[in-house]
Image: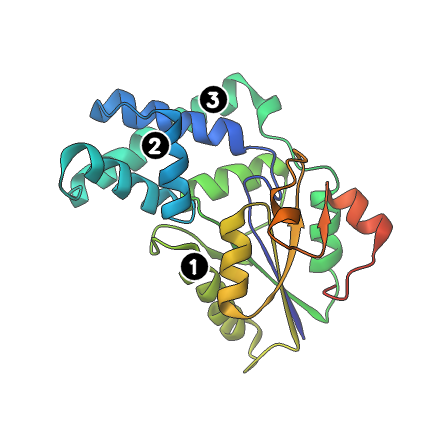
């Protein structure tokens, strides 16, 4: 059995920009923490781009202490409300990367495949976006940033939980689909295959040495040239 693992923002969903904006607006409005562009980029790189990691990093940099459990809960609550309002006002921002849903369903409907989602989002954020895309997630392993600060750990959890879900000791092949350098680094650290999605065509993944990079899933389906599929 083969396991395919998907990131969400920038991979399945074209939501990276709006997600970043809502996150930054929330922490600035609710905690009076000003987040400049260079600090934001540092936070993402140093924490492998997870919601939990970024919040802890920005909060500690500004307040010189870790956030409390209540402060974390408050951040999640306010961020969720902001995302919901943003989706209601601008649903056009919550669209799929072209071909994502079709490819996801092709994988899902093949009985020889297992499927997981490993995302740096908090769970409520991941579910909101999957619903907006019309992707059925209810019976799929969903590994999120609620329990993990680092991308590598939540991807590893996606593998372990998939083994339990599909009743296998190991998979013949594991491929992770992602758009960020931290996705690639996590795949390398875990010794699994990686396929890059570069919808913005910034070339970062190519520069890092990723062998198989596609603009979107339509191109991936049409080329079908990766041994990781």
- The tag on residue 86 is 3
Q: Quadrant of residue 177?
A: bottom right
Location of residue 35 in the rendering, given as x and y in whole percent from the top left corner: 32, 26
- Mark 1 / mark 2, whichever is N-terminal: 2
Count of marks, rendered view: 3
| Residues packed near mark 3 inside 10 Å, few (<14), some (14 to 19) or many (20 plus) | some
Quadrant of the image for the N terminus? bottom right
The residue that appears at 30% across and 39% down in the rendered structure is 55
Of residues 102 and 229, which is closer to you in this image? 229
Label 1, label 2: how far apart the Cα atoms are: 24 Å
Residue 143: x and y in percent read 45, 56
Crowding near the residue tagged with mark 1, few <14, some 14–19, many ≥20 C-alpha atoms within 10 Å: many
Which of the labelled discs sits on residue 39, or is there none?
2
Of callouts 2 and 3, which one flags the residue occurring earlier in the amino acid sequence? Answer: 2
Give the residue at the far right of this rendering.
222
Of the two numbered discs 1 and 3 on the same chain, state the one appearing first in sequence. Answer: 3
């Amino acid at each position: 059995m083969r396991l395919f693992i998907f990131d969400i923002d920038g991979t399945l969903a074209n939501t990276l920009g709006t997600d970043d904006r809502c996150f930054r607006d929330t922490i600035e409005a609710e905690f009076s923490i000003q987040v400049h562009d260079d600090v934001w980029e540092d936070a993402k790189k140093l924490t492998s781009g997870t919601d939990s990691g970024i919040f802890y990093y920005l909060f500690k940099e500004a307040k010189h202490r870790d956030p409390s459990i209540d402060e974390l809960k408050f951040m999640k609550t306010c961020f969720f409300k902001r995302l919901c309002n943003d989706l209601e006002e601008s649903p056009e921002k919550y669209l799929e990367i072209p071909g994502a849903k079709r490819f996801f369903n092709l994988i899902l409907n093949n009985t020889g495949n297992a499927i997981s989602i490993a995302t740096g989002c908090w769970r409520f954020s991941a579910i909101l976006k999957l619903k907006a895309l019309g992707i059925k997630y209810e019976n799929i392993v969903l590994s999120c940033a609620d329990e993990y600060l680092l991308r590598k750990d939540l991807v590893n959890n996606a593998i372990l939980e998939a083994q339990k879900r599909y009743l296998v000791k190991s998979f013949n092949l594991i491929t992770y689909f992602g758009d960020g350098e931290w996705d690639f680094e996590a795949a390398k650290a875990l010794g699994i295959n990686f396929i890059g999605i570069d919808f913005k065509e910034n070339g970062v993944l190519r520069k890092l040495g990723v062998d198989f990079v596609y603009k979107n899933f339509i191109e991936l389906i049409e080329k079908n040239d990766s041994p990781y599929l």
